[in-house]
Image (spheres, rainbow, N blue to C red):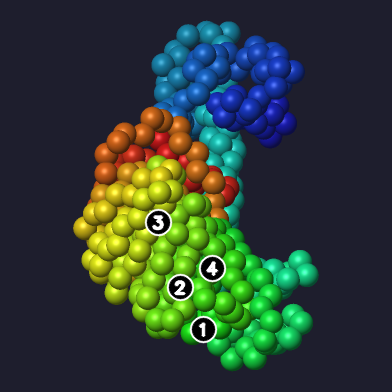
């Protein structure tokens, strides 16, 4: 077969994909001298897959031999006219072949793009258990599920194991300040020297002493963390978070700074806490929450499920707007978000396992919100 058919097919395929260069476009226009029927395709750049399929199937349905026989049958004229009809038939047949090859190239490109997208999507996995521990001298230790080792920092000595970090057996007399940083796409838990247990969500940080000394037990947190505070009435446990102080005695609570309003939400699941921000302070009991920031504290009835859900392995969307939902998704799967249309102020209710694939997440969000969610590379696109 003449190579010009393949070249014409390749150029048509590039054109309908809008990937043709100026030089290639000029080459295609020259080829329309031999294939004038291609002009109709050139006039319709940007055809969708369905329309391309229809056009090619239409041409392919007119079998080459049937065209030939029909034309020859109708030609009962002199030899010159017969020759002209034969030339037209050959041209029609070559057009069918050219378009078929073009369609094949187009399909292969779509298939390749699909396969690449699927390969990338298979690389996007739910979060895992990992963190970075920064010691008092600034050195860093990477923590993951497969590690089993011992860390030494001055008189502090502790083990790394699959259940997280455990400072409860630390025999050090002098405290050193450590920092536990959780990246996107991860979570981690730690038991502090006093027996307090802390679970940290993705993109969060906890700063704490290797051992507690003095009257108060003080830690700092950003992001989202759930605390089960060890009881010690003589030594109040205090959490400092972006200007808000949460004081607890034998208490379990969740702190979240990942709100779209840049406020701090503290949900109390057990006991009693005192929340202080600026000159204000409020004491709440289990089943309540505070929204604090910039010297203001608001107290509301709490949804306990919201405090416990992420720790127990699922997303819980209870009257959350799409921006908050997307924030949780992007932090857990370590992906970017590309919002290509204006979001509404609507709030949504639903849930999803944090072990779900990114494809399942997209489908769930499609059903939940009515927006279209697709993945491209490591980017979640909202249309």
Q: Mark 2 points at which residue?
A: 237
Asked if residue 148 is positioned above or below residue 185 in the image, the reply reads: below
Pointers 3 and 4 in contact (C-beta within 8 Å) = no
- Compare marks 3 and 2 and give the one earlier in the sequence: 2
Give the CA separation, mark 2 to mark 4: 8 Å
**Rendering quarter of residue 308:** bottom left
Disc 2 crowd rating (10 Å Cα; few below 14, some 14-19, many 20+) is many
Q: Name the residue under label 3.
A: 276
- Compare marks 3 and 4 and give the one earlier in the sequence: 4
Under circle 2, the secondary element is strand
Q: Name the residue under label 4.
A: 219
Under circle 3, the secondary element is strand
User: Closer to the observer: label 3 or label 4?
Assistant: 3
Q: Nearer the viewer, residue 332 or 165?
A: 165
- Compare marks 4 and 1 and give the one earlier in the sequence: 1
Asked if residue 101 is positioned above or below residue 92 in the image, the reply reads: below
Give the CA separation, mark 3 to mark 4: 15 Å
Disc 1 crowd rating (10 Å Cα; few below 14, some 14-19, many 20+) is some
């Amino acid at each position: 077969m003449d190579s010009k058919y393949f070249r014409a097919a390749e150029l048509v395929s590039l054109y309908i994909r809008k990937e043709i260069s100026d030089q290639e476009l000029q080459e295609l226009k020259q080829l329309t001298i031999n294939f004038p029927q291609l002009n109709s395709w050139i006039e319709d750049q940007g055809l969708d897959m369905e329309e391309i399929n229809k056009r090619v199937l239409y041409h392919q349905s007119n079998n080459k031999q049937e065209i030939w026989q029909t034309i020859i049958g109708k030609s009962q004229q002199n030899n010159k006219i017969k020759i002209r009809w034969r030339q037209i038939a050959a041209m029609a047949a070559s057009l069918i072949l050219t378009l078929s090859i073009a369609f094949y190239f187009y399909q292969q490109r779509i298939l390749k793009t699909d396969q690449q997208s699927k390969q990338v999507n298979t690389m996007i996995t739910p979060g895992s258990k990992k963190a970075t521990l920064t010691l008092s001298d600034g050195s860093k230790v990477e923590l993951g599920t497969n590690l089993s080792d011992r860390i030494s920092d001055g008189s502090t000595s502790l083990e790394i194991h699959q259940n997280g970090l455990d400072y409860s057996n630390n025999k050090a007399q002098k405290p050193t300040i450590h920092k536990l940083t959780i990246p996107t796409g991860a979570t981690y838990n730690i038991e502090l020297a006093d027996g307090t247990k802390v679970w940290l969500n993705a993109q969060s940080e906890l700063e704490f002493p290797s051992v507690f000394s003095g009257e108060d037990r003080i830690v700092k947190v950003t992001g989202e963390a759930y605390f089960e505070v060890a009881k010690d009435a003589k030594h109040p446990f205090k959490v400092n978070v972006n200007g808000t102080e949460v004081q607890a005695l034998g208490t379990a609570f969740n702190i979240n700074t990942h709100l779209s309003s840049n406020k701090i939400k503290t949900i109390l699941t057990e006991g009693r806490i005192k929340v202080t921000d600026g000159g204000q302070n409020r004491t709440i009991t289990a089943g309540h929450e505070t929204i604090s920031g910039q010297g203001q504290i608001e107290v509301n009835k709490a949804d306990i499920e919201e405090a416990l859900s992420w720790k127990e392995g699922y997303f819980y969307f209870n009257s959350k707007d799409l921006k908050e939902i997307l924030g949780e998704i992007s932090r857990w799967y370590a992906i970017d978000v590309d919002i290509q249309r204006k979001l509404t102020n609507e709030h949504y209710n639903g849930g999803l396992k944090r072990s779900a694939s990114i494809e399942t997440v997209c489908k769930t969000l499609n059903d939940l919100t009515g927006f279209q969610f697709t993945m491209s590379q490591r980017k979640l696109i909202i249309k």
